[in-house]
Image (cartoon, rainbow, N blue to C red):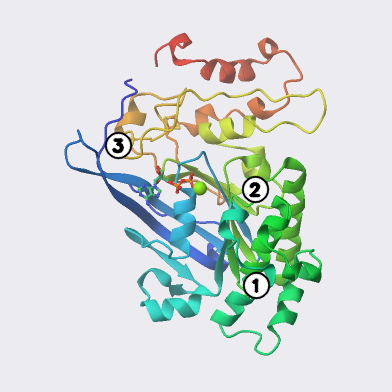
Amino acid sequence: MSASTASAAPSPQPAPAPLGAARALLQVDGLVKHFPVERGLFGRGDAVVHAVDGVSFAVGAGETMALVGESGCGKSTVGRLVLRLLEATAGTVRFDGVDLTHLPAAAMRQHRRALQMIFQDPYSSLNPRMTVGQTLSEPLLLHGLAKGRRAERAAELLDLVGLAPQYLQRYPHEFSGGQRQRIGIARALAVEPRLIVCDEPVSALDVSIQAQVVNLLQDLQRRLGLSYVFIAHDLAVVKHIASHVAVMYLGQIVEHADKDNLFAQPRHPYTHALLSAIPLPEPGRVRARVLLQGDVPNPIAPPSGCRFRTRCPHARQRCADEVPQLAGEDGHTVACHFWREIALPAALQPAAVPPGANQRLAYLQAAFLPQAERAPC
Ligand SMILES: Nc1ncnc2c1ncn2[C@@H]1O[C@H](COP(=O)(O)OP(=O)(O)O)[C@@H](O)[C@H]1O
Ligand code: SF4
Ligand SMILES: [Mg+2]
């Protein structure tokens, strides 16, 4: 099968039965975002970046949905569409039953308070010329909150994220990365949101600090009943915080499951590869590493059929001809024609026995050999 990319037409997936749908606070259906771009000097006309193509999910009150995938697969675009910082090309975002995608601007402003965002780089998202006190007072002022007691409320917010009130007079450059992220969280909390999109909130932090910030987010969730859409590029980060996990590849969700199911019984070959990159906590034990070949294809011309086929070791003709639909039972959905025959949970177990002694493991490792070393499919 050719590894070339072929389709220009988008191939949105139908809406799956999203987890948390019965009690959804946030309900996203068939979300599409295409960015028109110029092909450049030698290009022939305009092109379209298929950043998000038919994404559906639901997040219940007090839940955390993790959105995971390699850089460029559309995670931040989904986050921005949810908050309507970007206008969707198609699809709907419902929050507490209200369709945000078609709300007039004035009505949208009323709902914006309930939805906030935390960014990867807290330094660039904080104004360097504003003290922490000013940063935290700004949203209070904007939304007419805590009238007559804004300084007090700013101190409360700092306390909520584990920082002392004397920091109110300081500027962002006087803080460490972890402290700056805490200030970013406090600013998001100022308007008493119900859902926060956390866009790679710990990716820029030292590993030792990452756990502290994740713990803080979990603690705040318990105390304030918050819902999160937690964006990350690797599964290790979301292992403790997620209620359910959606794995994205090239603008589409390829697998979505309850966290425990996804980690114990991954079904999509891409999820296998992402999971295999997580180190095991026990010293001296390793997972069979699944190395993917090549980069994510150009989202201007995504591959026909299954978008993962150019990197999938199990790809065959049907994968190029037919778009796999996201489907499955018990809320564990997967978009792969052949997941039943290629799901190999043994591959994700510790390699306690030599690979040669474990046929299933050996099969998977062979499957992920470089293209040139594989038998043609
Ligand atoms: N404003 C834009 N114009 C054109 N392409 C964009 C724009 N924003 C994002 N993209 C493209 O959309 C795709 C998804 O981007 P993004 O959502 O930032 O991915 P992720 O957050 O998973 O790294 C990427 O190919 C990116 O280059
Ligand atoms: S549909 Fe085909 S190419 Fe896509 S993940 Fe499944 S086996 Fe691989
Ligand atoms: Mg991003």
Q: Earlier in the sequence, mark 1 or mark 2?
A: 1
The answer to the question of whether label 1 and label 3 lie on touching residues, with beta carbons closer than 8 A, is: no
For image coordinates 60% across by 40% down, the residue present is: 234
Q: Alpha-carbon neighbours of circle 2 within 10 Å: few (<14), some, or many (≥20)?
A: many
Residue occupied by mark 3: 301
Q: For the C terminus, which image quadrant? A: top left
Relative placement, left or right, of 369 versus 136 is: left
Secondary structure found at label 3? loop
The residue closer to the viewer here, 62 or 73, is 73
Q: Which mark is residue 259?
A: 2
Amino acid residing under circle 2: Lys
Q: What residue is shown with label 1? A: 136
Q: Amino acid at mark 1?
A: Leu
Across the whole image, how many numbered discs are drawn on residues? 3
Does residue 27 sit above or below 305 in this rendering?
A: below
Q: The residue tagged with tag 1: helix, strand or loop? A: helix
Vertical position of residue 68 compared to residue 102: above or below: above
Q: Secondary structure at mark 2?
A: helix
Q: Amino acid at mark 3?
A: Ala
> In x, y percent, where is residue 315?
41, 25
N-term-proximal mark, 1 vs 3: 1
Residue 25 falls in image quadrant: bottom right
Marks 3 and 2, the one that precedes in the sequence? 2
Residues 290 and 366: in front is 290
